Image (cartoon, helix red, strand yellow):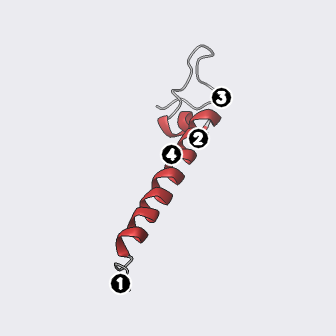
Amino acid sequence: MAQDDQTAAPGAEEEVPLGQRLYDNPFLLLVAGVIVMLVFYTGWGIWEIMQVPPATLP
């Protein structure tokens, strides 16, 4: 028979899932946001530069 949360032993703590631990850390979220934006905008910029046709000189 499974124990309910109310009948669990007082000393027994549940393990916090990895996703919740990551989302509970504001500094990790800040660093992840900066890295993601840096990678996407840098990649987008490089892609745009690669797609520009060579200029014809007079």
Circle 2 residue: 29
Circle 3 residue: 6
Q: Out of 38 and 29, give the one closest to the viewer.
A: 38
Tell me which numbered mark, 2 or 3, is placed earlier along the sequence: 3
Please state which of the two labelled residues, at mark 2 or mark 4, is closer to the viewer: 4
User: Which residue is rendered at x = 59% and y = 13% of the image?
Assistant: 11
Circle 4 residue: 35
Q: Eyeballing the image, is 5 above or below 48?
A: above
Tell me which numbered mark, 2 or 4, is placed earlier along the sequence: 2
Q: In the structure shown, which secondary structural element does the residue marked by tag 3 occupy?
A: loop
Q: In the rendering, at what x and y percent does residue 8 appear? A: 58, 23
| Cβ–Cβ under 8 Å for marks 3 and 1 | no
Crowding at mark 2 (Cα within 10 Å: few <14, some 14-19, many 20+): few
The amino acid at mark 3 is Gln
User: Which residue is rendered at x = 51% and y = 27% of the image?
Assistant: 15
The amino acid at mark 1 is Thr
Q: CA distance from mark 2 to mark 3?
A: 33 Å
Q: In the rendering, at what x and y percent does residue 38 appear? A: 51, 51
